[in-house]
Amino acid sequence: MYEFTYTANASRVIFGRGSLNSIEQEVERLGAGRALVLCTPDRRELAEPVAALLGKRCAGIYAGAIMHVPIESARAATEHAGKVGADCAIAIGGGSTVGLGKAIALESALPIIAIPTTYAGSEMTPIFGLTENGLKRTGRDARVLPRTVIYDPQLSLTLPLPISFVSGLNAMAHAAEGLYARDGNPVMSLMAEEGIRALAKGLRALKQDAANPDARSDCLYGAWLCGTVLGQVGMALHHKLCHTLGGSFNLPHAETHASVLPHALAYNAAAAPEAMRRIARALGASEAEANDPAAAALALHALSQELGIPAGLKSIGMQEDDLDRACQIALANPYWNPRAIEPQPLRALLQRAWSGVAPQPD
Ligand SMILES: NC(=O)c1ccc[n+]([C@@H]2O[C@H](COP(=O)([O-])OP(=O)(O)OC[C@H]3O[C@@H](n4cnc5c(N)ncnc54)[C@H](O)[C@@H]3O)[C@@H](O)[C@H]2O)c1
Ligand SMILES: O=C(O)CCC(=O)CC(=O)O
């Protein structure tokens, strides 16, 4: 028995090797003529070819993107865009750069073209994040959804494997929670399962050969699917926990997602057996194995180990003494989750996520 509401986001997506070459015509298609190219300070080499392809349509390169978009960086970028008369922003990079483009759009309504080079998936969502006085807030606004997304797998060939792996698990997290979302729907569930499957295939191939173009294409295809899910349906325990950990303890985003995901799925396994079956199946479990709700979390933990992802929040700088406070913060703002958020089980989840041991339901 199906019952759902589904409103598609209106992004235009161009996917393929060499699709970067279409950037000038995509700027023209938006009716723009002065595109500001955004990147992080350490990735100007990504922005320069875009500026060259744009020629006279380029309003310059702004290399001021910072993770979690500090409000000061957003204000400076918006001011600069105004000063150079930009009528479009092109964000080439990961979620930090797309996040800066979104901050400019939130203030100025400039159209964004996103050219993702990690698997974060921000390019496919109307979700923005801004950090002020050490506190990160997120919201949804149609103005921040990139109008056009160009996925060119060639551009992620230089993404280091450690970042590729954790960014891939960040993407899988969107799909996993999308499979048990309160407002989920069959289209998003199909995309979520296929996204996890494509990323598992691509990440495993990257482990063998970081320069494998087909593996990069599989990963970026999976990131597109998972990012689309994130943009369409609500998230739950896993994303709320990672937001708390990232925002309150300044932990790196993708690494935090990768550490927490197996444990968040174990917490929810009994309450969302169908989602767990589809996740386990997408990760390569047999139909018989996938029928065990615990299989999804264990398969994800096994994939993390196979990829060599450092185990546990302790490996990315979180202190064990901070776990009690993390638990209190996570409990402070109630939100929907397929299983009730209870203090003791949540604290046990955080302990296991911190230590990096195998996940277990409790
Ligand atoms: N709003 C949303 O929908 C959404 C979704 C996911 C993530 N995010 C946000 O995005 C940020 C995290 O994004 P991220 O994980 O992509 O991190 P990121 O954008 O900071 O990139 C991670 C690292 O990869 C490097 N990198 C990127 N592309 C590269 C390339 N081609 N070659 C070499 N190095 C490259 C960057 O320089 C950086 O050091 C967080 O702030 C997170 O909250 C937002
Ligand atoms: O937590 C996520 O991976 C998606 C939401 C997010 O990062 C919001 C933001 O900080 O831009």
Image (tube, rainbow, N blue to C red):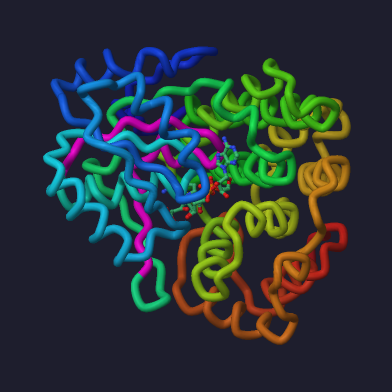
**In screen coordinates, is 159 left or right of 333?**
right
**In screen coordinates, is 211 left or right of 177?**
right
Magenta stretch: includes residue 350: no
Residue at 35% of width from left, 30% of height from top? 6
Depicted 222 relative to depicted 355: above or below: above
Residue 234 makes an appearance in the image: no
Residue 225, horizontal then vertical, whole percent: 53, 28
Judging depth in this view, the residue of 25 and 149 nearest the camera is: 25
Q: Quadrant of residue 169?
A: top right
Chain part drawn in magenta: 109-131
Q: Quadrant of residue 216?
A: top right
Looking at the rendering, in which quadrant would you find the C terminus? bottom right
Residue 170, horizontal then vertical, whole percent: 61, 46
Q: Quadrant of residue 159?
A: top right
Magenta stretch: includes residue 118: yes
**In screen coordinates, is 291 left or right of 101?**
right
Judging depth in this view, the residue of 103 and 334 nearest the camera is: 103
Residue at 53% of width from left, 42% of height from top? 120
Depicted 185 relative to depicted 73: above or below: above
**In screen coordinates, is 7 left or right of 21?**
left
Judging depth in this view, the residue of 182 and 226 nearest the camera is: 226
Depicted 79 relative to depicted 170: above or below: below
Residue at 49% of width from left, 30% of height from top? 188
Residue 361, horizontal then vertical, whole percent: 79, 60
Residue at 29% of width from left, 21% of height from top? 54
**Number of numbered discs visible in the structure rendering:** 0
Residue 280, horizontal then vertical, whole percent: 77, 35
